[in-house]
Image: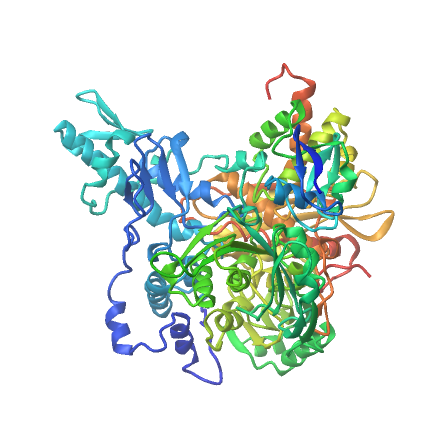
Amino acid sequence: MQTATPTQRRSTGARRKFLLATAGLTAAGTALVVGWSLLPVRQRLQRSQPLPAVPGRPALNGWVAIGSDDLVTVLVPKSEMGQGVLTALAMVLADELDADWSQVRTAHPPPDAIYNNIATVVDGLPFHPDDHGIIRRLADHLTAKTMREIGLQATGGSSSIKDLWLPMRQAGASARAMLVAAAAQDWGVPAGECSVSEGRVLHNRSRRSARFGELATRAAAQPLPDNPPLKTAAQFTLIGKPTPRHEAAAKHDGSARFGIDTVRPGLHHASLLMCPTLGGRVASFDGRAAQAMPGVAQVLAVPPLHGGTGGVAVIAATPWQAMAAVKAVAVQWDHGPAAGLNSSGIQQQLATALAADDGFTYLSRGDAPAALQQAATTLKADYSAPLLAHATLEPQNATVLFEPDAPGGARASVWAPTQVPGLARWAAAHVLDLPTDRVDIEVTLLGGGFGRRLEVDTVAQAAHIARALPGKPVQTFLTREQDSTHDFYRPPCLARYAAGLDVQGKLVAWQAASAGPSIVHQYLQRQFGLPGAGPDKTTVEGAFDQPYEWPNARVRHSIVPLPVPVGFWRSVGHSHQAFFKESFLDECAHAARQDPVDFRLALLKQHPRHAAVLRRAAQAADWGQPLAPAADGAPRARGVALHHSFGSIVAQVAEVSLDPQDARRIRVHRIVAAIDCGTVVNPAGVRQQMESAIVFGLSAALGGEVTLDNGQVQQTNVHQLGLLRGADCPLIQTEIIPSTAPPEGVGEPGTPPVAPAVANALFALNGQRLRSLPLRLA
Amino acid sequence: MTTPLRVNGKTTAVNATPETPLLWVLRGELQLTGTKFGCGMALCGACTVQIDGQPTRSCMTPLSAVGERGVETIEGLQGPQITALRRAWTELDVVQCGYCQSGQLVAAAALLKATPRPTEADIDAAMNGHLCRCGTYPRIRAGILKAAGMLNNPGVAS
């Protein structure tokens, strides 16, 4: 099968330039890059700076420390935002270490290059998953090397397990070998005669054993072993076992600390009122009335930072005083370039770009236009998806202590619920004119992330505000209204699909074009000041990178710059492209008078894993069998969707009905999902993430929409964001396909298929084809 | 001027003005951060506490409205209901990010105290005001039913 990497028709050199720009290497000489590229990706075991020494708790490498009390501290550089990453990554390391799971704890390490996320950036390269060619392999390798050196410590892109699967297993195996070496030395026996089980090193012949805690200090002094052997899948004792999350108890009794729960001596609170127009700023303000209110310490203007909007802030002794006083600030706004921008205008711009059809081509297979012309039947349809808010339940916040007169020079401390601690630290340092190493950052628990906390606008604002009250920790937090109206929204997208069927109903031509703004272009600009250019995989992922064996296919996307901040929203481009692609494929199946499952299977002959996932979901949902009406007698129908994202394959069958009391109200009774995510580390976590991703996608499918009027977001609080509530939540059944393939993403792949599965079920129910999100019946 | 406020069985003189929402007194002055700020408009349930056993949105309850009644937060809530709920929550892996769970548990404990054998409709009525962006709704429902089972059949191991 032929696949193509993206090309820009206007410039043949664009792709290479993009790769280099992605790698941040535009200034590097080609010869240097070539020479350096031949070296392997550097080790991720030992930090460049040792971990801060904790007496009685030596570190054996950059990932694990063992105390004389036998407690094993696994250092997890990923943020916990509900996805269970503390537990899953601790399991990965502890399994290779043969630790006693009851003695395993987790902590976040201070930043170091070994924690930089490689997987998610490699994933961001615009290649088809079936492309294993030399250019793709070279690009993957170069990007991996580069990200190891200059990349970001980031939690996102469903990449945590994939990124750290090998490094953390190697760290566990390495630490285990050092413990064994220390014991063998003590006992004067060959290391090869020792074994390890549940936190003890054993020498069976002499019946000796030692606890990890007894060996840790001497183990830490052992040389690093060369390539300690890793377990085979059959030897895993923790990996693959359903394991409750580590931090659950603290989330049951209120002791879990999220960013907004940061309590420090002398803590002050800042409330921020931003320009209602996205990207606007303060022209002038009068803070005298606010300054006179109880508890108020400072009133100040905050410029737009890292893509955020400018505003005024009040620092006060208590949060309520700050919230009350900021309302008393009189502000004249400079509304900026988004003033006058409306949702209808955005739609018009996207339609114009779509009509011009001159975007980047991401997939070109066969001759789609010719095949379309020769087809016996052709179908055409337009689809659209709106802006969406993240609506993390914990509003955006960060706490910053700026100490200009600290011993040794000015310094700062940051406490933040962030997905990007390295970038957050750098942003705070930049705002405070400090070297990065004069800023400490502590990552708290995150009350939801979903991509919103890949942005550092709030940290930068909090740093700017804390500078006005030196020596005191200041927590800046957004009210829900400020959070909802100053998000980095899921980009809007408009798509035009065309397909051709032959006389037998076989799909012979597939054309997809879409238009929308680029997240990556905006992100490079707002974080690094780099001009965004070239293709952006996130605009079109889910459309071009799918397994279907379309004989003739063309997938394009036109980037439409908009003065609206757009960001990474759980499953990113897949969140809307899956809806377009799987809905239109369903249209094709019905036009061909074929069963939607069979129609898809016919396009997956060379993709047995995808076919197996689809069959499993269909079987578990009794696809093809009669479906009983709902309890109130309303007829129900099923719809199906299959999607590949973040390395994992998910199929879902939705069962829907309409409310007999209100025929426009869509009810989703059950979602049956099947997933192949390769090796499963924690099946309990996979099930939770599938449920979470499905509910997240269902909120967007049934009610999610953000609209703009004069550059101002119209949805100000959670009741206007269409968020699903418990009474409307379907039953969710998850089938996990066993696999020993390398682990793939889990946090996001459940989101994309749910909207098309529901839309396809609605079509099966009443013949209405809904092509816009959210789904609204006529 | 201070106001006496009884929280988790202990009375403290708080400095906040009478119109200050209870939420901010708890989180700020008393540093009881288990009660969460979500929406500020009683739309999400994250700030739920019990006042004399009634589930109450603390973000819209001025300090002056509490009076002499006792406030129970997630940190102080005791009794068989919350104990059973925590056990059920553990067994069913309910929490994800956990931000909404203080409010969910405080409300569920009040529900089970008032209605030891809740129906699905009872659960909907008591819990539908509680948003969860992680989508733990099916497990919350199952957790409440499981906790009710534990309380109604204390001899039966779950």
Q: Is residue A627 left or right of residue A422?
A: right
Residue at x 68% of width, y 74% of height = A333
Q: Is residue B89 left or right of residue A231?
A: right
Point out the image quarter for the C terminus of chain A: bottom right
Residue at x 38% of width, y 31% of height = A103
Q: Position of residue A111 (x, y in %)?
A: 37, 54
- Give the colouring mode of the picture: rainbow
Whether residue A673 can be seen here: no
Point out the image quarter for the N terminus of chain A: bottom left
Picture layout, residue A526 above or below residue B132: below
Whether residue A499 can be seen here: yes
Name the foreground residue: B100 vs A620: B100
Name the foreground residue: A370 vs A319: A319
Picture layout, residue A302 above or below residue A425: below
Q: Quadrant of residue A150?
A: bottom left
Q: Quadrant of residue A404?
A: bottom left
Q: Position of residue B75 (x, y in %)?
A: 60, 33
Picture layout, residue A663 above or below residue A386: above
Residue at x 57% of width, y 58% of height = A452
Name the foreground residue: B156 vs B85: B85
Name the foreground residue: B15 vs A460: B15
Query: What is the residue that sits farthest to the front in this orientation?
Result: B1
Query: What is the residue that sits farthest to the right in this orientation?
Result: A661
The count of marks equals 0
Q: Is residue A222 left or right of residue A99?
A: left
Q: Position of residue A34 (x, y in %)?
A: 26, 73
Query: What is the residue that sits farthest to the left in this orientation?
Result: A188
Q: Position of residue A193 (x, y in %)?
A: 18, 30
Query: What is the residue that sits farthest to the top in this orientation?
Result: B155
